[in-house]
Amino acid sequence: MLKKIKSNRSVPRKLVVRTNSNSVITEQYRTIRSNINFSLPSEDMKTILFTSPSKEEGKSTTSSNMAIVYAESGKRVLLVDADMRRPTLHHTFKMSNRLGLSNLLIKKGRLQDTVKKSGIPGLDLLMCGQIPANPAELLDSEAMDGLMNLMKEKYDLIIFDSPPILAVTDSKILANKCDGTVLVVNTGKTEKENVIKARDALTTAKAFIIGTVLNNYQVSKKDDYYQSYTS
């Protein structure tokens, strides 16, 4: 009898920023926030896409924690689960995925009625909603353009968590629509060749690449000084 293996898609992402605000990892997310702010050519940039070359490289964990640190900075933030093939945001925040982005794109509901409060001041969530048969077509639609414009009116920053860019075309479409893109790679897992392919794919999509987040990097003992200091 085969042992049933729990799918990674149903595993909640770790919100270390929320559970341990003084940790080294949390401080690294704040550093990433600062680096992104310094990299943006304009304060008017409101939409940031997080993607990765392949699956399970940490983009959903990174985008969720980054949304929290941006909300902590006083911004009105909307975190959108734009991975309409393997959504995870509802697992991470333990909420229903019955309504979300896919429903809005087929004109079923209004944004203000579909977003959910995260419980964190300044941070709202938009789940994926029902998984559609044609996610790429929905993301490439005029309905998506209109919805993004509406989001920009209501929020200071919109963060999109999207599928791996080398797996499907969804992220290329979103990268073209967003003001900037952050590529998340996993130390020791992501192959250099795939990082180059992901960069080339974003370039082809005419995306503005803000930078790359190196995920799961092992911190040496000498770097633990500030963790002890702030605990």
Image (cartoon, grey):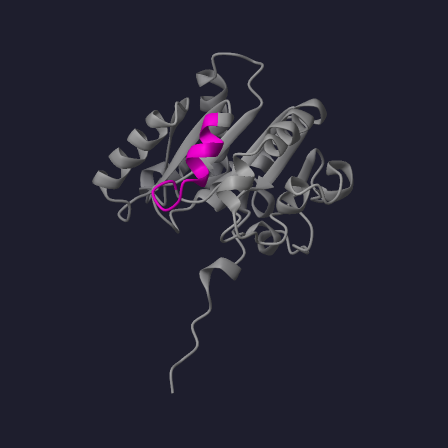
User: What is the quadrant of residue 24 in the picture?
Assistant: top left
- For this orientation, the residue located farthest to the left is 193
Residue 184 located left or right of residue 47:
left
User: Which is more toward the observer, 165 or 212?
Assistant: 165
Q: Position of residue 186 (x, y in %)?
A: 33, 44
User: What is the quadrant of residue 216 in the picture?
Assistant: top left
Q: Residue at x 64, y 34 (%)?
A: 78
Question: Does any portion of residue 65 appear in the rendered image?
Answer: no
Q: Position of residue 137 (x, y in %)?
A: 51, 40
Q: Residue at x 72, y 36 (%)?
A: 121
Q: Position of residue 204 (x, y in %)?
A: 33, 26
Q: Report the magenta residues as a range.
A: 165-176
Question: Does any portion of residue 195 appear in the rendered image?
Answer: yes
- For this orientation, the residue located farthest to the top is 42
User: What is the quadrant of residue 208 in the picture?
Assistant: top left
Residue 162 located left or right of residue 203:
right
Q: Position of residue 1 (x, y in %)?
A: 38, 87
Q: Residue at x 26, y 41 (%)?
A: 194
Number of numbered discs present? 0
Q: Is residue 135 magenta?
A: no
- For this orientation, the residue located farthest to the bottom is 1
Q: Is residue 167 magenta?
A: yes
Q: Residue at x 57, y 51 (%)?
A: 132
User: Which is more toward the observer, 127 or 33?
Assistant: 127
